Image (cartoon, rainbow, N blue to C red):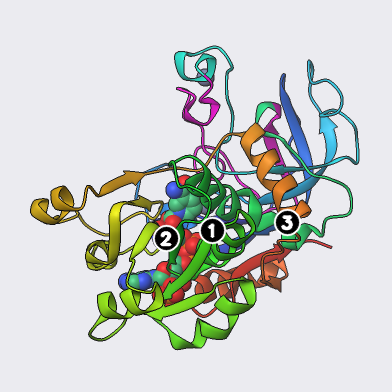
Amino acid sequence: MKAAIISKPHGDFEIVERPIPTPGPGQVVLKTKACGICQGDSIVKDNHWHLPYPRVPGHEIIGAVHQAGPGVEAPFSTVGKVFGVGWAGASCGSCANCAGGRRDQCRMHIMTGINFDGGLSEYVLVHASALVEIPDGMDAAETAPLLCAGITVFGALRKNGILPGSIVGIQGLGGLGSIGVSMARSMGFRTVGISTSDSKRDLAFSFGAEAFVNTSGDGAVEKIMAATGGHGLDAVIATAPSAAAVEALLPGLAFGGVVVVVAALDRNLSLNPGLMLKNNLRIVFQTAGAAHENAENVRFAKAFGIKPLVERFPLERVGEAYDRMITNKVRFRSVVVFE
Ligand SMILES: NC(=O)c1ccc[n+]([C@@H]2O[C@H](COP(=O)([O-])OP(=O)(O)OC[C@H]3O[C@@H](n4cnc5c(N)ncnc54)[C@H](OP(=O)(O)O)[C@@H]3O)[C@@H](O)[C@H]2O)c1
Ligand SMILES: [Zn+2]
Ligand SMILES: [Zn+2]
């Protein structure tokens, strides 16, 4: 099989030939149909976590069961059945976090495409506990981005006490943010697309935003106030990997507002405690969810017709697919397709 590896820190993608893996107990080999490219893949590409090399990145996987290992039961063992795999690469079911209902925070801390080889490969060996059921009839390339980008914004919008009818800003319109606008609108929020680029204005409206704010240049807070009728934002889902971008939005929040940071920020935040206290503001940080939440996220997207806008690439062009993401050119997710 062909696989795209990163063999050293800051290395380019290399296509290599490898044997198809054999599944051990509790494992499944998927024949990959599609794998999205997330900015989280830069953890491998740029050696953020100092992990061993080589590594196959990719944690937005859609694939069909090719072979199941001992102890794996139907439907996870059914050859040809389509599943997804996201960031959460395994859960034990019995540690304190799993037993407490936080399987995404399993203390094994096994992340797909980080701690084991991911989906930028014709076949991928995964843990059955990470498999996400995919309803019939969904296009693999349009579904793959839901497995990380989608679940992250889905969870951010659902888990932080944001009430229906709230004005929600989706800040940073990339892979996560573009899906976030559609999800926020589908959940009944009044949705504001917040971007540094006017080139994303029309697309933000097409995803369901009722207003669009370009925060580049002066007067970002005034623009937010104008877009929200003077109310401010009740919540912001911050997807841009920029601490400065988060700080700049805080004066644009309504009383009691919350910023949910899902991005990997580039530096520590600097906060004005007077502003935070006076307006009772909150900042929370949130990672992607577990496999069962991811299945809910995929079912939600199907029910509301949410289809990520994607650019499709063959595996041989994975380097170009990654570059278009990291240079903010892709609209809005690069997806490697295998058939
Ligand atoms: N919490 C989690 O579990 C989780 C899951 C997935 C990803 N992530 C993280 O979430 C972030 C976004 O991932 P993604 O895949 O959506 O990335 P992406 O497709 O590259 O989108 C990021 C967007 O942020 C904006 N942006 C980029 N650099 C910026 C800067 N310096 N200042 C202001 N805005 C900037 C751009 O939007 P505009 O052009 O609209 O301004 C860009 O399109 C990354 O940090 C990623 O590691 C976290
Ligand atoms: Zn990701
Ligand atoms: Zn566990």
Q: Nearer the viewer, residue 268 or 1?
A: 268
**Residue that badge 1 annotates:** 189
Indicate which disc residue 143 carries: 3
Report if residue 326 is visible in the image.
Answer: no
Q: CA distance from mark 3 to mark 2?
A: 20 Å
Residue 196 drawn in magenta: no
In primary-sequence order, the first of circles 3 and 2 is 3
Mark 2 or 1 closer to N-term? 1
Q: State the mark number for residue 222.
A: none
Residue range in magenta is 101-128
Residue at image position (84%, 33%) is 67
Looking at the rendered structure, the kind of residue marked 3 is: Thr
Residue found at x 20% / y 53%? 279
In the rendered structure, the answer to whether residue 232 lies left or right of residue 28 reads left
Three-letter amino acid code at the position of disc 2? Thr
Q: Position of residue 81 (x, y in %)?
A: 88, 40
Q: Is residue 114 inside the magenta stretch?
A: yes
Residue 205 vs 233, above or below: the answer is below
Residue 93, x across and y down, in percent: 59, 16
